[in-house]
Amino acid sequence: MNDGRPDQHESIGALERSAASRLRAFLSSPSATALLALGLVLAIGVAFSGDGAFHKWATHRDALRQASVYGILACGMTFVIITAGIDLSVGSVLALVAVMFSTLSIHEAWPPWLAVPACLALGGACGAASGLVVAKWRIQPFIVTLAMMVFARGLAKTLSGGMKVSTAVQLPDGSWTAAPVPGIFRLIDSRLLGDNISVVSLVFLACIALSWVILSRLRWGRYLYAIGGNEEAARLSGVPVAAMKVMAYALAGVFAAVAGLCQAAQEQQGDPEAGLGYELTAIAIVVIGGTSLMGGRGGIGLTLLGTLIIGYLDKILSVNAVPEASRLMLTGVIIIAAVLVQRRKD
Amino acid sequence: MTFMGGSPPSASSPSLLRMSRIAKSFGPNRVLREVDFELKAGEVHVLAGENGAGKSTLIRILGGALAADNGMIAIEGGPVRFRRPRDAADRGIAVIHQELSLVGSMSIADNLLLGREPGRLGWVDRAARAARARGVLERVGLRLDPDEPVSALPISSQQLVEIAKALSLGARIIVMDEPTSALSEPEVRRLFARIADLKAQGCGIIYITHRLEEIYALADRITVLRDGRVVASRPAGELPVGELVRLMVGRSIGDQAPRRAAAAGTVRLDLRRCRVRGEGAGRRPIVEDAALQVRSGEILGLVGLEGSGVSELLWAMFGALGKRAEVEMEIDGQTRRMSSPRAAIAAGIALVTNDRRRSGLVLSMDVVENATLAALPRFSPLGRLRRREEIEHTARTAGQLNLRCASLRQRVATLSGGNQQKVVLAKWMATHPRVLLLDDPTRGVDVGAKHEIYLLMNEWSRQGCGIILSSSEWPELLQVSDRIMVMHRGRVAASFRGGQATAADLLRAAMGHAIHE
Ligand SMILES: Nc1ncnc2c1ncn2[C@@H]1O[C@H](COP(=O)(O)OP(=O)(O)OP(=O)(O)O)[C@@H](O)[C@H]1O
Ligand SMILES: [Mg+2]
């Protein structure tokens, strides 16, 4: 995030930036804060794992796997939040895609190379629809995506008949049998590199990499930051504001679809009730990382850190068998603390 | 501008305020070093210096908005410590900040009377409140509905509301940081009359401006800051303008607004008809059937008072008003439909708006990102950003404009006001425009940079650009324009050849008095 600058413009500024001042600038940046928080969480993890769980790679592997679906959602959320928007529909879109993927793969026997693109397109379409309404009719993103959240959940229930779409198949004589688990499900749910990393974690990391390219290396990304920072100035500078907003929400939809694929494969079924409340976790991850809800500031690196923080916290709490109720309260406290720490920087 | 009159305060006048050895750094960037400053009762003390010299920083420290690293402030001899703006206000200091501090979503009355509403037990007496707000506005000559939200006001009215607010506090020390940068001549005169009243009441006024004629119309004493140090502090009579400029920018500047007319060529821009509807039903149009032509190499001055529609006309030509505007125009003989700013940029038009923070800059982005925003496709063939080229372009333009920043990666929010304006100009230079629409492009820019900007305009017109220039500084506008058009209530009321009009002519036409030629 803080790359070195070529020499030619050193002459312009009144002052050179010394190594020390660069270090100071880094230390006061959101990335440093997030890194510090992550370090703290890991230290707590090491301290409070009586049986030495944090010294085993499997613990880290599982923490990362469990955080991956949330992290994938958070990638898409980052785009939207950078434009000063919000997307509440990602949890529902995840469920919709999970249902669709399971139906297509298990019952319709679509091959993965057809089913996966179809599912991504469905997610993208949901997001693009929200984006269109936000951009063209200027309705607040909160309202629009709230509507989409309800709508997509309804659609998921309609498609599934309100039941989980699993490998259980009812035969004509009324008895039940199990259809084979599709290969693509088993692939996504497997581990690679000598059992050391889950495929979903690799998918998550790929999502981070893709998002980074878009946000930091492409014109589109720059446009998204400009829109979030000052929409009017962006418009007057020729930024295609509406198209960019549609793209941001469409990306959030596509990432939600990716998360839906992973969720379906891991559960080996499409649950229309899946992903309830996941949008809130995704927002929390983005905010804890340090991306500003006001738009225009933040980045995908921060979202990666936010995902790890949330993932490890969860792991620590479950390793220490902290009850669910306390976990929720603690998470609430941590969100506030993170935001307070980040705000100090402004 | 008229001389203020009144006798200057004598050396024995009591000292209202003394700031000593004030120092302030932002990271490694030392902005103020051991600054001493004194203000006497009944005195207008002008603080001068180029963009980024540290003037506003000193004022923010005085106003309690910023803590100094070092130094002391004493009011009427007694040392004070300000931890927040409220503390300074309690000690009788009112500050008109350079970057307006009004709350856009709140009404004018709410902004004016914030925390001082008439009424009891939290029950707001609306009628009394509106009457009081109206009274406060009258003092600066504003007739506005106090219930209107501030965000609906053009920048000049916002500035006047800000001034009215500061004047209504009954402060003894009044600080004005570039209060006139968006005001036109009559509004400036009214402000000067208020300043004369304040002086007579024994208030002390710290006044910051980049307009030399204002300095000499107002100042009893002038202090010049350069790179965060006081380089001179003398009675105004002992500091001739040439020396003042040299002290500020470190070199002499011959003519502030030089104009070397380029040979006018073919018609670059032909605005056949422009009409801008007013907002809300039943409102009169803001611009009515305006038409104008600009030839390549020509600078057309556009003048109008508040509500004349000058800014709206420029926005309409840039496609920025959407369906509110009907525009028929040709560029280089081709009919172009300006459906959006994007289309206008593609047609070779650039618009520098008069409100850099609201519509010019993305404050959260750095200098480079702002400077290339309008021409980004050129810096990102196939969508991939070429950061090296972006930095090279920005470094080059920043050099031309003498931009002062600690680094090109500095966020523009932390640049001084004049340097922010230069970033806006850099942004439009990157698009290589054929037609430049400039709405107060030198607002808040120091004398040296102003000179550079006018030289740049000469250069652009020599290269064949057509330029439309609107400016609140009429003397300069008269100097650089080949032709001047005056607008009144949405119509072109008069036009003059360059060099044949005076500020008085412009004012008469702008106020709607018929011109018989
Ligand atoms: N928050 C900040 N962080 C870093 N640098 C800052 C910050 N605020 C101001 N500066 C720097 O301090 C310097 C002085 O700024 P200041 O606003 O006082 O200038 P000024 O004399 O008022 O100029 P102008 O005439 O353009 O308004 C500038 O170089 C500016 O970049
Ligand atoms: Mg300033």
Image (cartoon, rainbow, N blue to C red):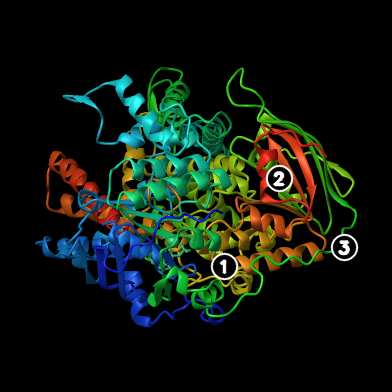
> Which subunit holds the residue at mark 1?
B
Q: Nearest the camera: A281 or A5? A: A5
Left or right, residue B402 beside residue B81: right
Residue A241, percent across and down? 59, 43
Mark 3 residue CB less than 8 A from any atom of ligand 1: no
**Residues under labels 1 and 2: Cα distance?**
26 Å
Query: To which residue does mark 1 refer?
Result: B447
Categorize mark 2 by other alpha carbons within 10 Å: few (<14), some (14-19), many (20+): some
Image quadrant in which the N terminus of chain A is located: bottom left
Residue plotted at (63% across, 45% down) = A240
Task: Kindly identify the amino acid type of the residue bearing the numbered disc 3.
Answer: Ala
Give the camera-side residue of B289 and B207. B207
**Residue at the limit of the structure toward the front, as seen here:** B7
Q: Tag 2 or tag 3, which sits nearer the N-term?
A: 3
The answer to whether residue A87 is above or below residue B403 is above
Task: Residue at 73%, 61% (x, y): give it.
Answer: B432
Up-down relation of residue B201 to residue A27 (above or below) = above
Labelled disc at residue B505: 2
- Give the spatial CA distance, label 3 vs label 2: 26 Å
Q: Amino acid at mark 2?
A: Asp
Which marked residue is nearer to the observer: mark 3 or mark 2?
Answer: 2
First in sequence, mark 3 or 1: give its number.
3
Q: Are marks 3 and 1 on the same chain?
A: yes
Q: Position of residue A202 (x, y in %)?
A: 43, 58
